[in-house]
Amino acid sequence: MTRGHRCAHRFRLRSLAAVAIAVTALAGVAPIGAAAPSPRSFVIAAAGDIIPHDMLVAHAALPGGGWDFTSMEAAIRPWIADADLAICHLEGTLSETDSGLSGYPRFVGPRAMAAAIAAAGWDGCSTASNHSMDGDWDGLVETLDVLDEFGLGHAGTARTTDEQRPTFYDVGGVTVAHISYSYGTNGLAVPESRPWAVNVIDTAAILGDAAWARSHGAQFVLVSLHWGEQYQVAPTAAQEQLAAALLAAPDIDIIIGHHAHVVQPIDVINGKYVVYGMGNHVSNQFTRWGPPYFATDDGLLVRIHVSERANGTFGVDRLELTPTWVDYPSYQVHSVADALLTGAGPATVLLESMDRTLARALSLHPPGVTITASPWPDAWCGARRATIVGTPESDAIVGTDGSDVISAGAGDDFVAGGAGDDVICGGDGADVIDGGSGRDRVFGGGGDDLLSGVRFSMLVGGEGRDSCSGTALLRDCDR
């Protein structure tokens, strides 16, 4: 799924009058005898910190000038793009003119970082952090200008008093509000004349903003907090107290956290989730740098499943966790399970990373949390990652002359494998699949399929009433 197919659209409320008109227009009564609409649902994706460290920026530099960061999130993109709304966390600032770049202690990255964030499938970012003022006032303004240029929403920092208000996203007709706050700005002063430029954590202010969002049409409120102690896995007492106070309010639905640079626990308070810390998403912090950077290459991508209740409100049903890991020196972020299957990293390192991440995230035994290795079931076939994936419609798929892994979608598909040694999986429709001239493995899906292949092919039926051609060496279709 590309960002263009996603149903999330950002908007800001311009006036109370506009809200009143919209509410009045939508307040009609359903016709007598009309079927009750199905409960609405959507998925929000969130991940750890994206930081413009100097070595990371240097790695993205192009020989002829400029930067390209897109490869860093290419492998994780399906997990992001498949969500209905995807919210990242940008820790640092971006230069509109690529001038004054800095990697530490002030983070000022090139504008190409925003291009890569958008290309990865993110819809917006939280921007309140201890590095929000690293480029001073002008840097804060330029950061938001650049995010705007690439169509990215933002919450937590502001150029005007109106912009300080919650950011709204239309997610398939459901209004989601995003609000973001930081514990501070590393002692860098927020302009006295613009105290609203960075949202600083204050319980009353957060509750007030959430209530304002509800009163202006928000049906689900997501809170991002830059909080806690760096490199400390356990949440601090202050984090726990703040989470309890916020999640006691009816206006806040979930809290997601950043800043610690290591994965922290997930808990349920007052029936609502707090994800204390998701570690790093893209950064130059690695275990290899030694203490205190142990496990800073670990991260967590969280998929938040939200659905409509009988009373018309929305709540979180469950969380799906995807442990992530950043490779050095490519700075590419991977799903750990995916990297194990594809050999994208050392198996021992990856297994240790996954064990750490899950042990930390699940240490408080939160209910309703599952682990996911793949964003789409269709992305795998015969225990291998698909190189060609069909759509939910009826497709005609033709493989290459090489060895392909083809996963048909839900429609009634025609698949021709081609010349290589292919692995082909049918979908839920009634498919016609021809392996081609190689030593192919062809698997039926949920429909009534017709499978064929040459002598040295293997044809295996699925859940439907499948037929296999008589030429293949191994046929198992009457299942």
Image (tube, rainbow, N blue to C red):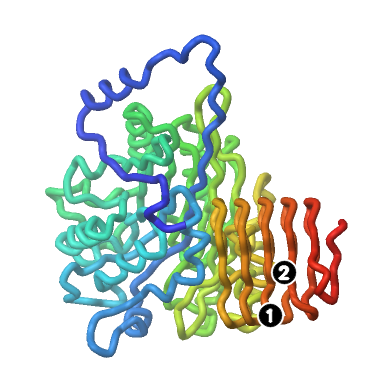
Depicted 288 relative to depicted 428: above or below: below
Separation of marks 1 and 2 at Cα, in angstroms: 19 Å
Q: Tell which of 134 and 4 is nearer to you.
A: 4
Evaluate whether residue 183 shows in this view. Answer: no
- The amino acid pointed to by label 1 is Ser
Depicted 399 relative to depicted 271: above or below: below
Extreme residue toward the top, this view: 32
Query: Is 395 on the left or on the right of 464, as rendered?
Result: left
Residue 146: x percent and y percent? Answer: 22, 62
Residue 416: x percent and y percent? Answer: 62, 69
Marks 1 and 2 close (CB-CB < 8 Å): no
Give the image quarter of residue 61: bottom left
Depicted 446 relative to depicted 424: above or below: above
Q: Specify few, some or many for label 2: CA neighbours under 10 Å numbering under 14, 14-19, or 20 or more.
A: some
Nearest to viewer (mark 1 / mark 2): 1
Q: Which residue is mark 1?
A: 437
Evaluate whether residue 251 shows in this view. Answer: yes
Residue 52: x percent and y percent? Answer: 34, 73
Residue 478: x percent and y percent? Answer: 87, 57
Quadrant of the rendering where the C terminus is positioned? bottom right
Residue in the picture at 43% in, 53% down: 86
Q: Tell which of 404 and 114 is nearer to you.
A: 404
Q: Which residue is mark 2?
A: 382
